[in-house]
Every structure is written in structure tokens, then in C-alpha cells.
Amino acid sequence: MSQTVDRALSILPLLAEGPADLGRVADRLGVHKSTALRLLRTLHEHGFVYRQEDQRYRLGARLIALAQEAMENLDVREIAHPHLVRLNEQCGHTVHLAVYEENEVLYIDKVESRYPVRMYSRIGKPVAITVAAVAKLLLADLPENERRAVVEKLDYPMYTPRSTPNADGFLTELAKVREQGWATDLGGHEESINCVAAPIRGADGRVVAAMSVSAPNVVVTADELLTLLPLVRRTADAISGEYSGRTPVKEVTA
Amino acid sequence: MSQTVDRALSILPLLAEGPADLGRVADRLGVHKSTALRLLRTLHEHGFVYRQEDQRYRLGARLIALAQEAMENLDVREIAHPHLVRLNEQCGHTVHLAVYEENEVLYIDKVESRYPVRMYSRIGKPVAITVAAVAKLLLADLPENERRAVVEKLDYPMYTPRSTPNADGFLTELAKVREQGWATDLGGHEESINCVAAPIRGADGRVVAAMSVSAPNVVVTADELLTLLPLVRRTADAISGEYSGRTPVKEVTA
DNA sequence: CGGTTGCGTTGCAACACTTGCAACGGTCGT
DNA sequence: ACGACCGTTGCAAGTGTTGCAACGCAACCG
């Protein structure tokens, strides 16, 4: 909607690929070097980009700090965290918390497995939306029309033979998940990793987040992991209860 | 330098304080509502802001994902991580990795203490720059004039009676730190928490990052923590060596 | 129930701001 | 020492941005 801002913001994902010099940024944006320079300067003033010694631009520290604040403002996260820790203490596996936001599912918290074999994932990383157990729960709860729209637009990469192959299969899966109130990912993302997930609901019953327990086959079989389902659901329900109980609206005085 | 972009970017820190509606954003920016609306729309298209059901704007998911990528691009981090983990396995305490960037010191990695009592800190959170041990190391290595400039501009909040009180005291401390090649924070930030830190240097000898071990008094006394100094320094040196050894330039084909 | 207030939204005309150009200055490599 | 390359700056042209005023909509209240 605003050309100038649009261009400036487009620089950031570009720099996320790695440091780039002025010429490169200008080329990728399709604008004159001087234009790119001025945009970069503005971004720099705000700390969104950083200029390293070799004069190339990198993403800046303020971006990281800001993202941090963004996450801390999510109250689900704060409420859920102690529950996630306790669950981890009980079962020992990796515990994740995720939310949905405009075509993306994002991990917003994580407690690491206590077993030596750990799965790779990072807070802030967009989730493999077509296969992750938490993603299924979050998408399953979207209003009918929105859900269809999102599902149609997705890609369905075959991470493994058991990955969700296409939109139709995914819709069927989502229907099942919505009905049963929990979800799994049995080797759909990484051959040897399974997850069980349960939804966290707000006072109105809508799913506001989802949590999961993940473990590799070498530690527990899928069947063994499934025996944790009641525990996971109880934990999710506990968080739901606490979350709907009060609405701790952080008031910022004008 | 670019008014439009400048305004747009100013919206983000503003939203970091908490969700805000259109009117509020316009007021804070000092522009007409329609202008603010268009800026917000552009930010929205790029996923930097999110519109919640009550129509108010929040920081968006893409911001978090971008910050994530920004951190993964820092090669010190990647190299250091396994060393941090090993150090944590050896001593059991919380291990931090931090870098300096334009007047801020930022934690970019962390391995949690294995003791039940943990200190609060978060990756991405700007560090208490006047007292943290890692901050001292990073600032101590700045070129004379830049160091003075930064130190003068800082605030010196008295978190505890042992916090650095003012610029002069800080400069003295930095001189000491530079000379001895390591730093401590003994209850300068939180009364009961102590840290020992060591610098990580690039091939040219400049400090590129700093790492620290932190533990509360209730677990180990300051003296006991200091006995870990050799171990911390060895770890830092190991990282330095590996970091200077190769320059794994991530090439992105145009 | 109708009027009022408050909010987000849109089309438009004026003009401020952005844009690309051309030229400069520095650094590196030959 | 020369040329090539990259970042930087002043300027004139014009495009994109801005504030305004008017609209639609919901909530609130008399």
C-alpha cells in the first residue's frame, strides 16, 4: 500500500538470507543504488539493520530485541510455561507451545528433552504446517471458510512417505482432529520422530494455542508416546482453565 | 532519512509496549489516522504486525521468524553453542553468550542451569549493560574514543548497592577488565547472583563475543564461582580458536 | 427506538517527499 | 599511477504520500 515502506520492508527478508552490500540490495529491489542507500540508512537508524566492518548490511539487534518483546506480550506463553516445564519433568521429552497467525504456525515456547537425543527446532521458527500435530489442531479450529482458504493455498512437501500429500487429505485429517480434540504426527515430518498434541482454549472455547510432546523412535515407540496422551490433555486443559479464568489485560497508560 | 519509512518503523517499538488501536498509533506518530492506517496496512502485508479480533494491532509473527533467522546467521553462535553445552555439563550453571552492537549488548545464546534455582534472562533481551560481566568485556574492547562516547551516554541505574554508579567508575572498571582479560559481576544486577565471564576473540584479536557462567549465591558462593574462571577462559579460548581458524563465509548465489 | 458518538475506511486534490541521474571521492587491484 | 568499482551527495522532476472531509458501521444512551 505504501511503496516506500514496502520496499524498505522487503530489504529485511533479503538480508535474512545473509549479509549483502548496497549494490546487491539495490538490484534485488529493482531500484537505484541511491534509493536503496537511503532506505538502508533509515533502517539503520532504527537498529533494524547493522553495518559490519566490510560495509555489508546484516539484520540488526533491535529486530531481535523487538521479537523478544513481541513474544513476551503473548500472555498464553507466560501462563503456559510453568505447565510445560512440569510436563517435561514428568515425561522427559521435548515440549512445544505453538500459535497460529495468518497462514503460519509458530513455536513460541519450548522445553528441551532430558534425553541426549534431541530434535531440532527453534522458538520462532515457522512450523511444517501440513504435518505438525500442533498445526493440525490450530488449523482445525479455524472457521470453515478460512480453513478451506488456507488449506488450498498451502504446499504439501513430502518430508517423508507419511507426510500429508494434498489439500483433500489434509482437510480429512483436520476434520478427524477437530472431532477427537487431539492430534498426532507420526513420522510425517521426520521419519523417526513422533508427536502428540492437545489444544489450549480460551474462555469462548476457541483454540488459542496448541502444545505437543515430541520424541524420537529410538527413545520411545509411537505406541508408548501415545500413552502420554491423557497427561498431555490434562496439562493443556489446566492451561486453558488458567488462561480463561482471568484476562490479565496489560494496561498501558496513554 | 526517509520520512515514510521512519514513521512506519516507529510504529513497531510502539506496538511492543502492547496492542494499540488505530487512533492511538496515529496520535503517537503525530499523523492523521488515514496515514497511520496505510502504514499499518503495509506492515501488515509483510506480516510485521497482526490484527487481533478486537481490531487492535500487535507485533506479528514474521518479526519473530526474521529475528530467528538473524540469530542463526551469526556464525559465532553456531560455533560456540556446543562449547557452551559442554561447559554447562561440566559446571551445571547457566551459560550465556552475548554480542555488542551499537550501544546494546544482547544475549544470543543460553544454556540453562541444571540446578532448580534459575536466573531470569532471555535470548534477545538487551543486557543490563553497565553491570553485566559480558557487557564489560565487550565494551572494554571498543576503540578508546568509541568506548568513551558510549559510556558517557549510558544511564547507570542502581539495581543493587554494588551496581556501577557512574561513567567514571565504569571506565575504571573497563580498564581493569581489559587488562586482566576477564570480568565478573558480583551482585551488581541482582543481589544474589554472580557471574564470571571471558572474551571470545576473532583472528585479529578483537573481541567478537563474550560468554559467562552465572549462578545464584544459594547454589555457590562468589568465591566458589571464581574457581571456575580457568575453565571459562579455556572454553572461550577454544571458541576463539575455532572462530578465527576458518571464515566460513556463507555464499548466497545471486 | 432514533440520535449521537466513536471508530475504521475511502476518494481526492495539493504538495511534500521520494526517486533516478550524474558527478564526486575514496579504495583496491593491476 | 592508472582504471575500475563502490558508496555517497546535490539536484530537478514527478510520483507517491498526506491530510481532509465524507461515509459506513457499531455501540451507546437518552
Image (cartoon, coloured by chain):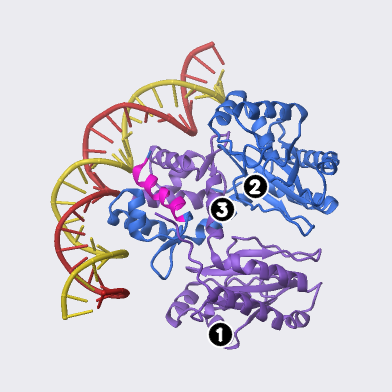
Chain colours: A blue, B purple, C red, D yellow
Location of residue B178 (image quadrant): bottom right
A53 to the left or right of B138:
left
* Residue found 68% across the figure and 26% down from its top: A172
Give amino acid for label 1.
Answer: Arg
Q: Main secondary structure of the magenta part?
A: helix
Which numbered circle lies on residue A67? 3
Q: Is B218 rendered above or below residue C10?
A: below
Q: Which residue bears the numbered disc 2?
A: A107
Residue A155 showing in the rendered view: yes
Judged from the image, the secondary structure of the residue bearing numbered disc 3 is: helix
A80 to the left or right of A29:
right
How packed is label 3: few (under 14 Cα within 10 Å), some, or many (20 or more)?
many
Which numbered circle lies on residue B89? none
Give amino acid for label 3.
Answer: Ala
What is the span of residues highlighted in magenta in the rendered image?
Answer: A2-15
Residue C14: percent from left, percent from top: 21, 38
Q: Which numbered disc, 2 or 3, marks the residue that appears first in the sequence? A: 3
Answer whether residue A11 is magenta in the image. yes
Between the residue at mark 2 and the residue at mark 3, the CA separation in whole angstroms equals: 13 Å
Mark 2 and mark 1 residues within 8 Å of each other at the beta carbon: no
Viewer-side label of 2, 3: 2
How packed is label 1: few (under 14 Cα within 10 Å), some, or many (20 or more)?
some
Between the residue at mark 1 and the residue at mark 3, the CA separation in whole angstroms equals: 32 Å
Q: Chain of mark 2?
A: A
Viewer-side label of 2, 1: 2
Between the residue at mark 2 and the residue at mark 1, the CA separation in whole angstroms equals: 40 Å
Q: Chain of mark 3?
A: A
Q: Which residue bears the numbered disc 1?
A: B178
Q: Which quadrant of the rendered structure holds the N terminus of chain B? A: bottom left
Residue B189: percent from left, percent from top: 66, 71
User: Total number of numbered labels?
Assistant: 3
On the same chain, marks 2 and 3? The answer is: yes
